Image: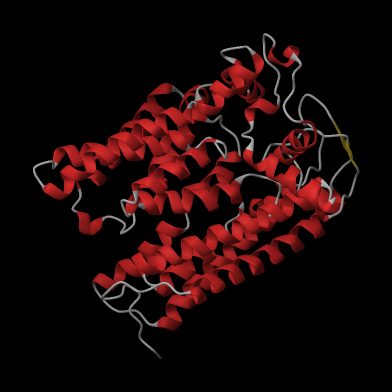
Amino acid sequence: MTAVALRPARPAVATRLDAVVAVAVFLVARAVSAVFLVVSAPDQIALTDSPTYHVEGTSPAAPGYWQVITNWDGQWYETIARHGYPDDPSVLGPPAERNPYAFSPLYPFLCRAVMAVTGAGFGVAGGLVSLVAGAVGCALLARWLVVTRGRMTAHLAVAGLVCFPTAVLFQATYTESLALAVLVPTLRAIHEERWRPAAGLLVVLAVTRPILAPLALLLGLALLLALRHRDDPAARVRVRPLALLTVLAGVCTLAWPVAVAVMTGVPTAYFDTMRAWVRAGGLGGGWVGGLAQLVGPVLVALLVATALAFAVVRLRRPDRFRSPDGLGTWGTSYLGYVLMTTTVNPSLARYALLTLVPVEPLRRALTGPLDRAVRSQSRVLLGAGLLLGVELAVQLWWVRTLFVVTSPVALPP
C-alpha cells in the first residue's frame, strides 16, 4: 500500500498533461450524462409555448438528445439566438411577462454565430459551445488547483465538479459552462493580483451571467482587509487596484440592466422582468423571505444569525485555516447571494455549480487529515470513487425527475 501526501511541501507546477487529464475526465462525465439524457428523454411529453413553460416553436414527445438538452432555460436562449431580443413593449406590462431580457447575451449570440457558420440547429450549436467552454473551464481549474492544492486533490476536485448532480448543464444549452470558463481565470487573476486581466474578465462576465454582485462583495472584503493592514507595504499597494476593481465590478453588475433600459426605453425593464419570475414562483424575497413565509420569521432569523456568526468566525480565523486559493470564500459569497436573490425552488442545486461547491469539501476531506497523519492513496481513491458514484446516482434522479419534462405541471430544474 503506497502512502501519498496530497498537500505538497512546495507548490507543484501545472503541465499540459494536467489540462489533458481534466478535459478527458470532463468528456467521460459528459458521456455518462448523455446516456442519462438519452434513456430519460422517451418519457418527455410534447410541449408547446405556455405561461408555465416557454417553447421556441414546438417540442415533440420523446425528443432526441439534441432536442432534450434545450429544455427549460435553453428554450429562452434558442429564442434569443434565432430572433434576438424583442421590440414588443407589451412584454414589459405592467406587469411584465417573463421574456428574453432576463438572459445575458454572450451565450446565445455565440450560438447564433456557430449556427451561421456551420448551418447546425440550435441544439447542436448550443451543445457544442457548452462542451467546448466546459472543457476549457475544467482545464483552467485543474491547472490552478494543481498549483494551490496539489495534483491529486486538483483532479479529484475537478472530477467531483463534473459529476455533480446538476453537471448535466455543462452540455446543455445553458450558460454554466461559459460562465465557468470565464469565472475560473477571473478568480485566479484576482488571487494572483494580476489586476489588468481581472478587469478585462469582469467586463466579459457582465454579458455572460449575472454573477458580478458576489464578485464585487468578494473584492470589497479583500479591500477592507488591505485597508485594515495598510501599515504593511504589501497590503498598501493592493488598496488602489482593489478599490478600482470593486468599483468596476459594481458598474459591470449594472451593465446589462442599463443596456436593457436603453433597448426598451423603460428604465426598470430588467428588474420588472426578473420580478415576473418571482411572481411565477409564488414566494418573494429570495430564499430568506420565502422560507420566512413557509416556516415563520423567527426560525429564519435564527438561521440567518447563525450563518452571519459563522461568517464572522471564518473571517477572523488565521490564514493557515483558509483555502489556499480563496475558493472557499468565493463559494460562501456566491451562495449567500443566491439565497438572497432567488426564489425557493430546486434551481438552487443548479446554481451551486458555480459556487464550485465540490472543490472545497474535497479539499477538506482529502487534505485536512494530512495535518495530523498521512493517508494511503488507495483509501483516498476509494473514498473519492464512492463520492463520485453517489453524485452520478443523484444526477440520474435529477435528470429523470426535473430536467426531463414528464408533466404539464413541472418544477424548474
Q: Residue furthest bottom?
A: 1
Q: Is residue 272 above or below residue 115?
A: above
Q: Is residue 43 shown left or right of residue 219?
A: right
Coloring scheme of the render? Answer: secondary structure
Residue at the image point whose x is 56% and y is 73% from the top: 20
- Quarter that holds the N terminus: bottom left
Q: Residue furthest left?
A: 231
Quarter occupied by residue 138: bottom right
The location of residue 37, given as percent across then percent down, is 76, 56
Q: How many marks?
A: 0
Q: Who is closer to the viewer here, 176 or 160?
A: 176
Q: Quadrant of residue 90?
A: top right
Residue farthest top in this picture? 94
Question: Percent x, y for residue 393?
Answer: 64, 61
Is 174 left or right of 376, judged from the image as shown?
Answer: right
Give 151 or 120, whichever is nearer the viewer. 120
Q: Can the viewer see residue 307?
A: no
Give 366 or 248, whichever is nearer the viewer.
248
* Residue pictured at 45% horizontal, 28% vertical: 288
Q: Quadrant of the C terminus?
A: top right
Residue at the image position 44 percent from the left and 59 percent from the top: 359
Query: Image height check: is 150 above or below 88?
Result: below
Residue 355 in view here: yes
Q: Position of residue 387 (x, y in %)?
A: 52, 66
The percent coordinates of residue 15 (x first, y second) are 45, 74
Residue 165 to residue 376: above or below: above
In-image side of 117 versus 387 (left or right): right
